[in-house]
Amino acid sequence: MITVFTRVETDDIDSLINDPEVVLALVEDLGFDPSDLLSLAGQAENIENVDPMALLQSMEERWNGEGQTFSLEDQIYLLTHILQQTEIHKGSRIANLHRAGKAAPVYTEHGPVRVITPEEAKEIAQELELLPVENIQGYAKLESLNAAGVLPHENWTEQELITAPLWQLYDALGLFFKNASEGDQYILLAVTD
């Protein structure tokens, strides 16, 4: 399961979220099919001629926080579990990020797409800015993760925790929410395959 955040500029969020086809197209637009890859790589004749640097740069937008879409991959449950185990952060917006916003009438295989308002995005951005990733790493307890069966591993090893992608994605998540906040944008949150 992959958690996807999509920034949306609209004056009429109600009309947007009542159009399932548009919403699903927005939140499921993460991958690249071969024709997209070819166009990204300078109109190469076939996939073997794709410039690896152009491909890497295009795919980095998915994780650097600058793009319209940001993927937290399968790390949202790790983030929320760790913070829910702390007294100081368990009621924070970040600790409940997987339930942020309001459920829309559009569903993926894993539940409703959620809509985060610009005001909520600003609050989340502020929390992310004030909470360094090093603090979250310090809060992480292997025993707690395993007792709760936290995805994606359910039975975490110390090595898996040390190398969890969350630690590299966290700052970009903050940048993504900051950009949404500054742009007065809504965010669609979805869990997809």
Image: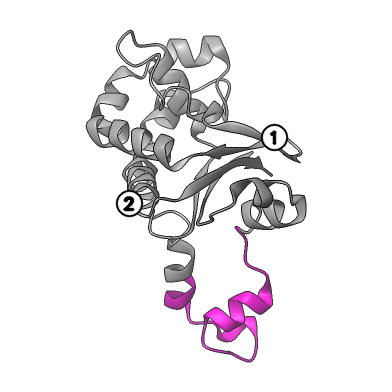
Task: Determine whether 155 is above or below 34 in the image.
Answer: above
Task: Determine whether 149 is above or below 187 in the image.
Answer: above
Task: Determine whether 33 is above or below 102 in the image.
Answer: below
Label 1 element class: strand
Which residue, given by chain and number where applicable, does mark 2 sit on? 182
Q: Residue 185's spot in the image, x, y percent?
A: 45, 51
- 181 or 64: nearer the viewer: 181
Task: Determine whether 146 is above or below 27 in the image.
Answer: above
Which numbered marker is on residue 137? none
Reading the chain from its start, which is encountered first: label 2 or label 1? 1
Which residue, given by chain and number where applicable, does mark 1 sit on? 112
- 119 or 67: nearer the viewer: 119
- 107 or 139: nearer the viewer: 107
Q: How many marks?
A: 2
Q: Residue 168's spot in the image, x, y percent?
A: 35, 44
Observer able to see residue 51: yes
Q: Which residues are magenta?
A: 30-55
Q: Is residue 161 left or right of residue 8?
A: left
Q: Residue 72's spot in the image, x, y percent?
A: 49, 43
Measuring 35% from the left and 11% from the top, which residue is drawn there?
A: 86
Q: Quadrant of residue 103?
A: top right
